Amino acid sequence: MVILPSTQATADDASQASVPESAAGEQWVLLFDGQSLDGWEKVGKKDSVWEVVDGSLVGSGTQSMLVCTAKTYKNFRYRIEAKINDGGNSGMYFRTTRKPSFREGYEAQIDSTHKDPIRTGSLYGFCHVYQQLVKPNSWFTYEVEVKDGVWRGREMTQIKITVDGNELYEYMDFDKTWPAGYFGFQQHDPGSKVHIRKVEVLPLAD
């Protein structure tokens, strides 16, 4: 597990939500070493494949999830670099379970041209983007910021979605659907091939 220097976050003066702030001295934690599947475990069909190719996690074959088993996280910033093939479908999961199905945990969709029209930038099942923000076979950065807090006296989970440095929206889940959990990636179907690199998390104060 590699520790990277933290970058200073700026306050969002427009937000009315009361949420935890980053604690002083917190650092980004690299979850994928670029060389092996250490700390990761496949959950799903046996003929699904997860491997390391040229410094990237690569998912192919039939349905499965690849789960980071190190620990659970509650409040955090989480970011990756990813690319998806033409016609492919994947997902970046957070606050998921130890051995998840596709329906367990929050999913930031990875999809440029799949027959499912819900595209990259979507918080699947909660807030959907139908515009193609990222072309297939192109690397992009994906970041989520997740915090439990209070908005106008109501408890909620606040989720910000950012693609290539552009913050798309802030979603407030008043049901607090998924508590602290694991990170994972989805291998959706045999026609999909996803590449993932630079997987890192910045824990935030509870």
Image (spheres, rainbow, N blue to C red):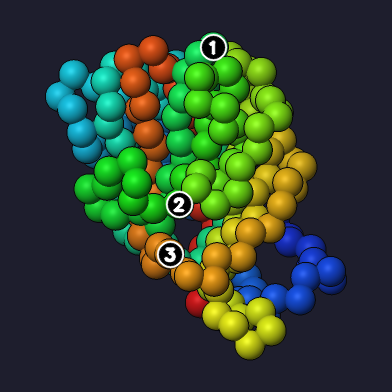
Which element is circle 3 on?
loop
Label 3 to label 1, Cα distance in Å?
31 Å
Which element is circle 1 on?
loop
The type of residue carrying mark 1 is: Asp
Nearest the eye: 121 or 49? 121
The numbered mark, 3 or 1, whose residue comes first in the sequence reads 1
Which element is circle 2 on?
strand
Q: Which residue carries the number 3 mark?
A: 177
Nearest the eye: 27 or 183? 183
Nearest the eye: 188 or 22? 188
Residue ranking furthest to the bottom: 153
Which numbered marker is on residue 86?
1
Q: Which of the 4 image quarters holds residue 95?
A: bottom left
Seen at 58% across and 77% down, the residue is 149
Query: Residue 195: in sight, yes or no?
Result: no
Which numbered marker is on residue 106?
2
Q: Which of the 4 image quarters holds residue 130?
A: top right
Residue 89 in the image: above or below residue 198: above
Measured as percent of width and height from the top left, residue 92 is found at 47, 40
In the image, 174: left or right of 45?
right
Residue 67 in the image: above or below residue 158: above
Measured as percent of width and height from the top left, residue 49 is found at 26, 20
Measured as percent of width and height from the top left, residue 139 is found at 62, 23
Label 1 to label 2, Cα distance in Å?
24 Å
The numbered mark, 1 or 2, whose residue comes first in the sequence reads 1
